[in-house]
Image: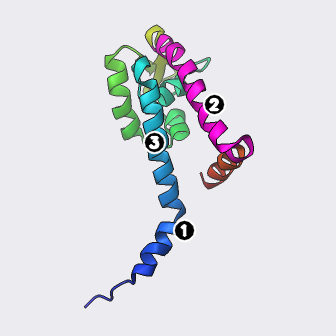
Amino acid sequence: MSKKIPFTATLEVRDACLCLYVQRAARALAKRFDEALRPAGLTNGQFSLLMSLNRPEPPGMAPVARLLAMDRTTLTAALKPLEREGLVRVDVDPADRRGRLLVLTDRGHAALARALPIWRATHAGIEAELGERSADDLRAGLAALS
């Protein structure tokens, strides 16, 4: 027979678990940005993905996957609707025909141009709620964990 864990352990995890706090905050932030970006026709995940492609030269799959902390399969799945909407194009890398380059199209640039002011306003509101020092400390702490 398994030993029951006391309810006090549940309360301990509820009150102390960093993973739980980060997951809850991530869901709340994602929802907030999804709602804000809806008029631009993007989700927060799509915005982040498109922004990760906004570079002087089209990146390959690996650097984008690393930046977004995704595996290649998840990145490929996230790219599909953006490709269908004409926001992103996946090209063969001329330097290595096995590789793929992720190209932000003119429509993708236009979508980012519509979404960026919304993101800036939403982000500024969240930072104001946290306070500048708290926002900087939060970024530093999360960066240390990743």
Q: Residue at x 52, y 21 (%)?
A: 95
Q: Secondary structure at mark 3?
A: loop
Q: Residue furthest top?
A: 106
Q: Which mark is residue 124?
A: 2
- Viewer-closest of 69 and 2: 2
Give how far apart the Cα atoms at labels 1 and 3 are: 27 Å
Residue bearing the label numbered 3: 70
Other-residue count near label 2 (Cα within 10 Å), few / some / many at <14 / 14–19 / ≥20: few
Residue 18 placed where, x, y %? 54, 61
Q: Amino acid at mark 3?
A: Met
Residue 134 placed where, x, y %? 70, 47
Q: Is residue 125 magenta?
A: yes
Q: How is the image coloured?
A: rainbow
Residue bounds of the magenta highlight: 108-135
Residue bearing the label numbered 1: 16
Q: Residue furthest bottom?
A: 1
Give how far apart the Cα atoms at labels 2 and 1 are: 28 Å
Residue 52 placed where, x, y %? 54, 28
Q: Is residue 103 visible?
A: yes
- Viewer-closest of 1 and 20: 20
